[in-house]
Image (tube, helix red, strand yellow):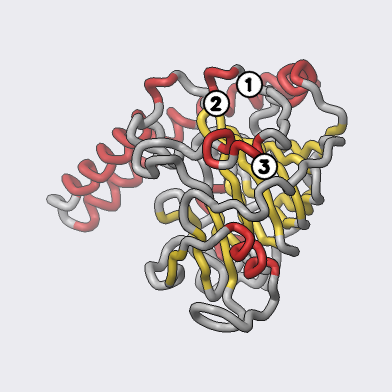
């Protein structure tokens, strides 16, 4: 059942670089929905060929099971577009209602991030996005195409990104990093696949997560800060572009991560250390494991939340 209150995502219009950096970017704990009054064009590469693979899937991808994405196929771009637009297919790989999804890749998918300017140079001429970050911070620009009804699982990215909706309408649901404890995480993904009619007997804590929701129209731009969870649902055949950029020092990122979705190096080390620590606790009887695990939780809370609590107290005193 759907028990979460739906919160609106704040909207800004006519945003330039100065406004973004001065008024929006400092609000890193909030999601900013920006309407950009500039249509994006998709016309020049209709007969072209996508670099990378187009995946046809029978239902929403959950990102956790190995049996969801059944086939990868490379198709001429115009054929792929034709299939992705269709609700029912006379020519299909799996079933007449199969869905299609394209996520562009780098020239060498194992080493290079996607870059619209390299994989789709003709389209890049028609795609102009506000420069809200320094050129050297750029990481990737990912070209995406989705069949209507295709839904991508709830996950987070470690970099800030802008999601530009080129054509079609898309619903985006977002959750704050502060609600991570309620999202039943496996890695960077939530185990809760159905966020609209969630089984609360299986996931009782999920109802505590605050749900932000917006509908992207063609020409809209959504700023998704790093670590914010997001779930997308294509309401229509849709084309979009994600632009990711680094906001941490370069050495914070895994250099062998062309997708930009691996946890920062320090975070990965900390999580590995935690796993080793939990393994050491298993040398103790269960009641001792429980006791010292609780002590560790308290220690983490006091260290991780101390500054946040102090800042909140300072804000309250300033407004008193």
Above/below status of 33 relative to 287:
above
Label 3: how many Cα within 10 Å (few below 14, some 14–19, many 20+): many
Q: Is residue 274 above or below residue 75?
A: above
At 55% from the left and 83% from the top, the residue drawn is: 95
Spatial distance from mark 2 to mark 1, Cα to Cα? Answer: 8 Å
Quarter of the image with the C terminus is: top right
Residue 171 point in image, percent of width and height:
73, 57
Depth check, front residue: 246 or 196:
246
**Eyeballing the image, is 107 above or below 311?**
below
Give left or right: position of 131 versus 298.
right
The residue that disc 3 covers is 163
Is 226 on the left or on the right of 71, as rendered?
right
Q: Counting other residues with Cα less than 10 Å from the Cα at mark 2, is it few (<14), some (14-19), or many (20 or more)?
A: some
Instruction: Find the distance from the CA under tag 1 to the CA under tag 3.
Output: 14 Å
Check if mark 2's residue and mark 1's residue have beta carbons within 8 Å.
yes
Q: Secondary structure at mark 2?
A: strand
Q: Which residue is mark 1?
A: 133
Cβ–Cβ below 8 Å for labels 3 and 2?
A: no
Report, in whole angstroms, how far the alpha carbon at label 3 lies from the one at label 2: 14 Å
Q: Return the residue at label 2.
A: 138
């Amino acid at each position: 059942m759907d028990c979460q209150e739906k919160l609106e995502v704040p909207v800004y219009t006519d945003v330039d670089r100065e406004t973004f950096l001065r008024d929006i970017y400092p609000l890193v704990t909030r999601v900013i929905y920006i309407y950009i009054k500039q249509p994006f064009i998709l016309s020049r590469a209709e007969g072209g060929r996508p670099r990378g693979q187009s995946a046809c899937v029978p239902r929403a991808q959950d990102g956790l099971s190995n049996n969801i994405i059944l086939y990868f196929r490379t198709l001429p771009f115009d054929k792929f577009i034709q299939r992705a637009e269709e609700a029912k297919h006379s020519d299909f790989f799996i079933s007449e209602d199969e869905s299609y999804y394209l996520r562009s890749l780098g020239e060498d998918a194992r080493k290079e991030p996607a870059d619209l300017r390299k994989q789709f140079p003709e389209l890049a001429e028609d795609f102009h996005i506000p420069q809200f970050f320094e050129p050297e911070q750029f990481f990737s620009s990912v070209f995406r195409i989705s069949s209507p009804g295709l839904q991508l699982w709830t996950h987070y990215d470690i970099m800030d990104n802008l999601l530009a909706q080129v054509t079609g309408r898309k619903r985006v649901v977002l959750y704050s990093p502060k609600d991570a404890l309620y999202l039943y995480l496996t890695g960077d993904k939530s185990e809760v696949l159905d966020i609209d009619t969630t089984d609360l007997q299986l996931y009782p804590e999920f109802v505590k997560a605050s749900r932000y929701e917006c509908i992207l129209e063609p020409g809209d731009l959504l700023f998704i800060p790093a670590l914010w969870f997001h779930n997308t649902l294509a309401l229509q055949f849709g084309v979009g572009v994600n632009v990711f950029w680094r906001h941490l020092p370069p050495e914070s990122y895994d250099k062998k991560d062309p997708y930009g979705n691996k946890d920062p190096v320090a975070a990965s080390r900390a999580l590995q250390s935690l796993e080793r620590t939990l393994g050491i606790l298993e040398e103790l009887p269960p009641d001792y494991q429980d006791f010292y695990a609780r002590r560790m939780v308290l220690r983490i809370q006091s260290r991780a939340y101390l500054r946040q609590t102090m800042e909140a107290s300072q804000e309250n005193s300033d407004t008193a």
